[in-house]
Image: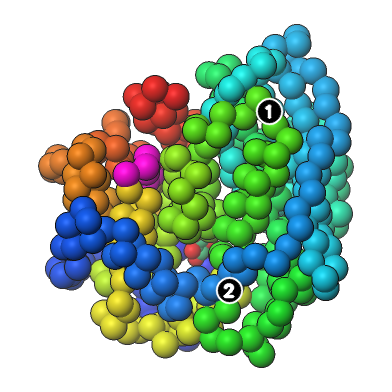
């Protein structure tokens, strides 16, 4: 099913019939050997910065974090907490809130951190989280008009955030509203983190300056800084980032760059996420750049219909995360995100794990199973149904983390 808002009119038709998938040649990720791998990884990261996501600032900010509010929940078995993060430069400051649900244990507990689409208050029906002061998008399916956050929007996306189950399984779950990092609109840069740094205006900035996906990835990494500073209960060796769809793209990009992220769980991330660009199946760069011109850097437009000229492909994005834990998930009907292309990226990234003496991807059963996870320390699952983050996806993600002793 193709997501048709904003419109695809005038763009090349998306090809979704698996029978029409071209065979693609992908650069092997283990060509440089184990000794050459760190340099190869740096080269891939730089290519992704230059041509897809853009360069984020590497320094020049001050970060302050504090635990602002806290309440016991679920009969005292868990805490709910809001951590306020302030990021400041000489140009000004911005702040955002991390909503945490965690077991009432001294720790150390593993942490799942993920951006949400519409505000922390939409992730639980409980009237506790602070209503975001940031702009919120229209959520047609959930009956929310967008604009200013409303009491009536509490919990509209709670189905994607099974906090009680995750905390019951021993995890702390931390979520941040992506719109407090940067609103998801072409002019959203004005109200996010970009004005804290030089070249904020994307039309005047260098063509390889950061786009929204990179700003969100930066926000995830700064949120980790904040957690590590003020959350003594968080286990610094078991930090995972999780993301659905556009937030899955940002989660992968954050993990590719930041070795503190020990695991990434990327759900239906598709184009510029886990899907191989060269297949040109489902959403392509041309569609993404036309409908979401703010997500990637301007330089990415040169590859709109020229995927084969990209110096990297998305299996190399996954390989940048080796030998840490990667779990890519697709939905069978989500052909817009190219499930076969996401699987292919895992297969071709696998040798980056074997190179490090870790289980790679292994053989792919035919047909691809819909009832289990496949792979080694880089894994994949495909579940029946459409584009969404469901209980089944969480169940399989937790299975992977448990298998690795989390
Ligand atoms: C659109 C977009 C995708 C994105 C998705 C989402 O469908 O084209 O790239 O992943 O929205 O974030 O739900």
Number of the front mark, 2 or 1: 1
When the figure is inspected, residue 73 is found, relative to residue 152, above or below; the finding is: above
Dominant secondary structure (helix, strand or loop) of the stretch shown in magenta: strand
Q: Is residue 370 visible?
A: no
Name which quarter of the figure residue 198 lies in: bottom right
* Residue labelled with disc 2: 210
Q: Which mark is residue 57?
A: none
Task: Of the two numbered discs 2 and 1 on the same chain, state the one appearing first in sequence.
Answer: 2
Give the magenta range.
323-329
Is 92 rendered above or below residue 81?
Answer: below
Q: Residues within 10 Å of mark 1 (few under 14, many from 20)?
A: few
Q: Which mark is residue 232?
A: 1
Q: Residue 78, position in %: x, y?
A: 70, 17
> In this view of the protein, which residue sits in the foreground, 190 or 161?
190
Q: Is mark 2 within 8 Å of ligand 1?
A: no
Residue 301 position in % (x across, y down): 46, 84
For residue 285: magenta? no
The residue at 55%/19% (across/down) is: 170
Check the picture and name the quadrant holding the N terminus.
bottom left
* Residue 195: percent from left, percent from top: 76, 74
Residue 334 horizontal side relative to residue 159, left or right: left
Please say if 266 is above or below 195. above
């Amino acid at each position: 099913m193709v997501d048709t808002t904003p419109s695809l009119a005038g763009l090349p038709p998306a090809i979704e019939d698996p029978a029409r998938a071209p065979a693609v040649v992908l650069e092997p990720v283990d060509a440089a050997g184990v000794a050459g791998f760190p340099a190869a990884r740096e080269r891939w990261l730089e290519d992704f910065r230059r041509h897809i996501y853009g360069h984020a600032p590497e320094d020049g900010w001050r970060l302050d974090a504090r635990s602002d509010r806290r309440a016991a929940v679920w009969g005292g078995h868990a805490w709910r907490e809001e951590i306020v993060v302030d990021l400041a430069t000489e140009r000004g400051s911005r702040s955002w809130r991390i909503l945490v649900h965690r077991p009432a244990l001294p720790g150390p507990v593993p942490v799942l951190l993920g951006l949400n689409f519409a505000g922390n208050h939409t992730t639980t029906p409980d009237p506790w989280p602070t209503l975001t002061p940031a702009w919120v998008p229209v959520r047609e399916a959930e009956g929310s008009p967008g604009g200013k956050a409303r009491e009536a929007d509490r919990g509209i996306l709670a189905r994607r955030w099974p906090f009680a189950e995750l905390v019951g399984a021993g995890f702390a779950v931390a979520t941040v509203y992506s719109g407090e990092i940067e609103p998801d609109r072409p002019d959203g840069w004005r109200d996010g983190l970009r004005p804290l740094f030089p070249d904020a205006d994307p039309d005047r900035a260098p063509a390889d300056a950061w786009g929204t996906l990179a700003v969100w990835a930066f926000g995830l990494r700064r949120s980790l800084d904040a957690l590590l500073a003020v959350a003594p209960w968080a286990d610094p060796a078991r930090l995972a980032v999780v993301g659905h769809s556009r937030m899955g793209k940002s989660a992968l990009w954050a993990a590719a760059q930041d070795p503190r992220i020990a695991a990434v769980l990327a759900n239906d991330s598709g184009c510029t996420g886990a899907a191989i660009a060269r297949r040109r199946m489902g959403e392509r760069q041309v569609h993404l750049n036309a409908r979401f011109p703010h997500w990637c850097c301007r330089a990415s437009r040169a590859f709109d219909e020229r995927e084969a000229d990209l110096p990297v492909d998305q299996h190399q994005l996954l390989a940048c995360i080796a030998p840490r834990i990667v779990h890519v998930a697709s939905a069978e009907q989500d052909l817009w995100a190219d499930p076969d292309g996401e699987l292919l990226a895992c297969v071709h990234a696998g040798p980056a794990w074997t190179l490090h003496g870790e289980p790679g991807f292994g053989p792919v059963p035919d047909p691809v199973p819909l009832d289990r996870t496949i792979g080694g320390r880089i894994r994949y699952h495909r579940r029946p149904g459409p584009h969404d983050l469901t209980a089944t996806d969480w169940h399989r993600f937790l299975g992977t983390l448990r298998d690795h002793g989390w």
